[in-house]
Amino acid sequence: MRKLTTLKENSIHSLRGDIRRPLYDRSRVEVGIVHIGVGGFHRAHQAWYTNALMNRGQAHEWAICGIGLREADRKMHSVLKSQDCLYSLVEKHSDGHVDVSIIGSIVDFILAVDDQRAAIKRMAHPDTKIVSLTITEGGYNFTHAGEFNFQNPDVQWDLAHIDRPKTVFGFLAAALKIRREKGLPAFAIQSCDNIEHNGDVIKKMLIAFVSRYDELLSRWIESHVSFPNSMVDRITPVTSAADIEALKVSHAIDDGWPVVCEPFTQWVVEDKFLNGRPAWESVGAQFVPDVAPYERMKIRLLNASHSLLGLLGTLMGFRTIDEAIADVRLERFVRAFMDQEVTPILGEIPGIDLEYYKVTLIERFKNKFIRDTLARICSESSAKLPKFLLPTIQDQLRNDGPITKSVTVVAAWCRYLELAATESQYQVDDAMKDEIMKLATESAHDPTIFLRNRTVFGNLVDSVRFVEMYNSTINRMRTMGVQHLIEA
């Protein structure tokens, strides 16, 4: 085996010639973007776009400084800092071909749980023009009714200790407070999470938080901070030990945390950046006046279908997305879900051929080299389903339209949680784990018990049609099994 190259600034020149590497001098770039939540998706998406732009000789003032707000970010911080913030991006094509690129657009990483002041100072710095976020669906701290959750203990801490925050809202508020007091322009806050109207959501949550302790700052934020909505898409599974080892064997790269992804990527953004932005459109991003139709399309087709395959596929004994979609019954089921229940409520989407888009989704799911685990897809379902699936059910109930497939996914979630109480192959990684598992188990004698969690289901339990169909579906699933139910 060829001698391994450990990723460092002074070693990338010795990498194999077919490995793409930064074409710019990283010592001369300046931080213009602070990103909160440096995980696999950010590194495969926004950091990838920014790196591509820098490779074209542009955007040298738009390098990225990552910030980790949680103790769980410590490992990523340690790995990236040891590698001069360089990492490998491994694109796996459906024909087995692999492209490897070294990404250099992230140039610093601050672990805020160790140094809150450094994180706030970096965000408040005049050169910071954008603060972007990938904090997962649950990070936005809103109730099912869409209001800010002030009962969160960390939120209560932040309101009392704004100079030593714990939440993203506390850090944003502390940095913006400094900028207002110094007469500096505000930065844009750019959500890159899978939430419809994600910019509007973070704006509403932040202003609600700030209004509790500084009304003047709240009004200043409303007038001076821009919150562009965006739709983001690139399937990025969790990096495995096998991925790290494969990179050593195939490309002689010793990378403590490479990121693996599909070749496909999409980014649709509203052009609302009051303090400037990179020309991401030069490398494939699409800027539009209204991102809402694209968000709705992606979340309700791709993300909801992912949850469908994750829950039903696990109950059928599969472990990865490609294994699940390879079962002709599941492929037909997910396509029927897309065609019958989602497509009729999407309407026209400028520049998008929905039929072609759905075909490409199925093909992306079939990429056997991505090996996206169903356990990852099923994680945090209490945060995902209310955003990905339940709005489709609510729209179809209003239209008196079909909901059979969607209800089957809800029933599959309950069954998944119910089995997880006794069977080790069902993993539950969810902020509401104890509560939802308890309700799922208790619902064995009364199916509606599971639906009474209004934090998740809102008023769906009040719909006679939904409840009757759900009760019938979960009872049939328990008696006849998922495979026979889907066939039926």
Image (tube, rainbow, N blue to C red):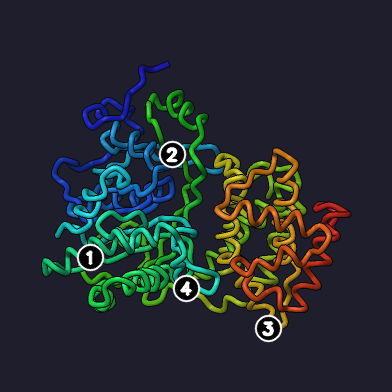
CA distance for labels 1 and 4: 22 Å
CA distance for labels 3 and 1: 44 Å
Q: Is residue 195 above or below residue 326?
A: below
User: On the image, which quarter does residue 192 sit in?
Assistant: bottom left
Mark toward the viewer: 4 or 2: 4
Query: Looking at the rendering, in which quadrant would you find the N terminus?
Result: top left
Residue 7 vs residue 131, the one in the foreground: 131
User: On the image, which quarter does residue 345 sit in?
Assistant: bottom right
Q: Which residue is mark 1?
A: 176
**Residue at the (45%, 23%) spot, across then down:** 249
Q: Earlier in the sequence, mark 4 or mark 2?
A: 2
**Residue at the (67%, 78%) spot, across then down:** 396
160 lies left or right of 128: right
In percent of width and height, residue 144 lies at 55, 70
In percent of width and height, residue 61 lies at 17, 54
SS at circle 4: loop
Q: Earlier in the sequence, mark 4 or mark 3?
A: 4
Q: Which residue is mark 4?
A: 147
Q: Residues within 10 Å of mark 1 (few under 14, many from 20)?
A: many
In percent of width and height, residue 172 lies at 29, 62
SS at circle 1: helix
**Residue at the (63%, 59%) spot, across then down:** 305
CA distance for labels 4 and 2: 39 Å
Q: Which residue is mark 3?
A: 399
234 lies left or right of 77: right
402 lies left or right of 28: right
> Identity of the amino acid at label 3?
Asn
> Identity of the amino acid at label 1?
Leu
Q: Which residue is mark 2?
A: 90
Q: Residues within 10 Å of mark 2 (few under 14, many from 20)?
A: many
